[in-house]
Amino acid sequence: MTKPLRKAVLPVAGLGTRFLPATKAIAKEMLPVVDKPLIQYAIEEARAAGIEQFCMVTGRGKTALVEHFDIAFELERTLQERNKTEALEALKATQVEPGSMVTVRQQVPLGLGHAIWCARAFIGDDPFAILLPDDLVLSQTPCLRQLADAYRDTGGNVVAVTEVPREHTNRYGILRIGKDDGRMVEVTGLVEKPAPQDAPSNLSIIGRYVLMPEVIGHLAKMERGAGNEVQLTDGMAKLIGNQPFHGLRYEGRRFDCGDKVGFLEAQIAFALKRPDLADAVRSFLKSYV
Ligand code: G1P
């Protein structure tokens, strides 16, 4: 019996330098894809996977992320008075259960591993999910749901993986793989951002993880890795051999919204899935290409 997965950590302390000046005064996770901020996609995906408790690892200038999931009393009142039912419905989706969302602060940007370690009190002895809101996945079944289901079957650690071109291995955490049934792969090693010639495969981790709490003990050593940062990938690598560790080739399409082209592509792909927008978007697209 695996312990139920109820907690998720969302690291949102990044500076968003790739989207300056848009991110000068607002968090990059508040940038919308169509009409919803990236952080809300992540929270909705987590909920759909059965997550009940959320921890955002924030930094300076990120208060809007907390506000976003609070009640906007005056705004709701005004909308009610004006009978704006659709707008009110949209606001409802931003509300979380009282007391279900906490934040911790990562005061210094020492890397993703350090950010996760900052959530150690929240994680405690429980398995937990990580969602990196920059990675947006368009799929039939929400990506984290797919991971949570796989976790229930196998136990231990499960990360979402996808094949990338060889020349891009230096952008991701890369797997060394053992047994592979085409969907689930056994992870025998992990390397953060290896050069193409050093990469043990071209199977990369995307920003969805189900991890065991023991990873925290490894991260606590604060060993520096790629880019002189405390890397989550290095902490996870230490679990291999002691606990099950699998990669799941998820069903769906991933958009790297930390990258300008990926972000633009996500806008189009998500808009084309919207019944209220698809026709209009398809027809204007034709005029450009
Ligand atoms: C992080 C992780 C990397 C992972 C990637 C997925 O990298 O360190 O292992 O493959 O997210 O998006 P970052 O995008 O923060 O450089």
Image (cartoon, rainbow, N blue to C red):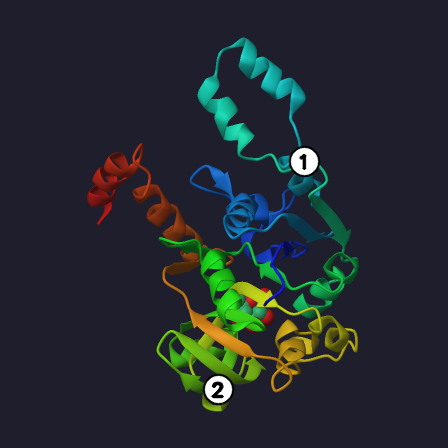
Asked if residue 128 is positioned above or below residue 288 in the image, the reply reads: below
Q: Position of residue 99 (x, y in %)?
A: 72, 40
Mark 2 vs mark 1, CA separation in Å: 41 Å
Q: Relative to the observer, which residue lies in front, 217 or 212?
A: 212
Q: Position of residue 170 (x, y in %)?
A: 51, 78
Q: Horizontally, is 58 left or right of 139 in the view?
A: right
Check disc 2 and give the amino acid type: Ala
- Residue 141 occupies which quadrant of the picture? bottom left
- Residue 25 occupies which quadrant of the picture? top right
Local crowd size for mark 1, using a 10 Å CA cut-off: few (<14), some (14–19), many (≥20) = few
Q: Horizontally, is 53 left or right of 144 in the view?
A: right
Q: Residue at x 67, y 77 (%)?
A: 235
Q: Residue at x 69, y 52 (%)?
A: 55
Q: Quadrant of ligand 1?
A: bottom right
Asked if residue 131 is positioned above or below residue 174 in the image, the reply reads: above
Badge 2 vs badge 1, beta-carbon distance below 8 Å: no
Q: Mark 1: which secondary structure?
A: helix
Q: Give the residue at mark 1.
A: 67
Lower position in the chain sequence, tag 2 or tag 1? 1
Which numbered marker is on residue 199? 2
Q: Is mark 1 within 8 Å of ligand 1?
A: no
Check disc 1 and give the amino acid type: Glu
Q: Horizontally, is 113 left or right of 36 in the view?
A: right
Q: Relative to the observer, which residue lies in front, 85 or 226?
A: 85
Q: Is residue 64 visible?
A: yes
